[in-house]
Amino acid sequence: MNNITDIADTLIKNAKQNPELCDIRFIKAYNTATNNPDENGYTAVVSIESVKRSSGFVSRLYKQNTYGDVFVAKLNVRLYAGNDISGASLTKSALLIRNAMIESDSEGYIDSSNIGSIEYEKDSSAVYRDISFDIEYILCEAVV
């Protein structure tokens, strides 16, 4: 696994194995900013907000005899709540997603995470919370 979309896909796939998240519909928005949240229930829109190279070609950063470029990305999960969801339920579900993502990160890509405040989106007439993750990974990993 060596690119951010693979890492994001794996984290989401593993987190969705948590039975407490079975009622949440996940949508990938890697290539578009448009989404369509449901009027009822939860919709989690996953997007990659930014990717930047943080270090040049480095050696032995994570493992002995491993070389590569270190990248940092921001992965965002915008959790929309339908008309039938309370603010407390939205917060509980945001915490469940955050914890499930961290628990599913067996490779240690997630450096930090944050849950934003409850916001209102005028275009979709929906409330949401952003759950963001700072991801660090090596691209073009080579073992010598």
Image: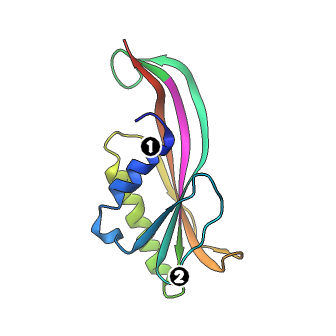
Task: Count up the numbered dots.
Answer: 2
Q: Is residue 88 left or right of residue 74?
A: left
* Left or right: residue 16 compared with residue 68: left
Mark 1 lies on residue: 6
**Cα distance, mark 2 to mark 1?**
29 Å
Where 49 falls versus 127 (above or below)?
above
Magenta range is 69-78
Nearest the eye: 45 or 134: 45
Residue shown at 37% from the left, 59% from the top? 99
Q: Does the magenta run of residues contain 45? A: no
Q: Is residue 65 left or right of residue 57?
A: left
Element under disc 1 = helix
Q: Nearer the viewer, mark 2 or mark 1?
A: 1
**What residue is disc 2 on?**
82
Mark sitting earlier along the chain (2/1): 1
Q: Quadrant of residue 63?
A: top left
Whether the magenta-drawn stretch holds residue 74 is answered as yes
Give the residue at the far bottom of this rendering.
84
Identify the residue at horizontal 53%, vertical 78% (top origin): 38
Residue at 41% of width from left, 55% of height from top?
12
Residue 142 is situated, as x and y percent measured from the top left of the image, at 41, 19
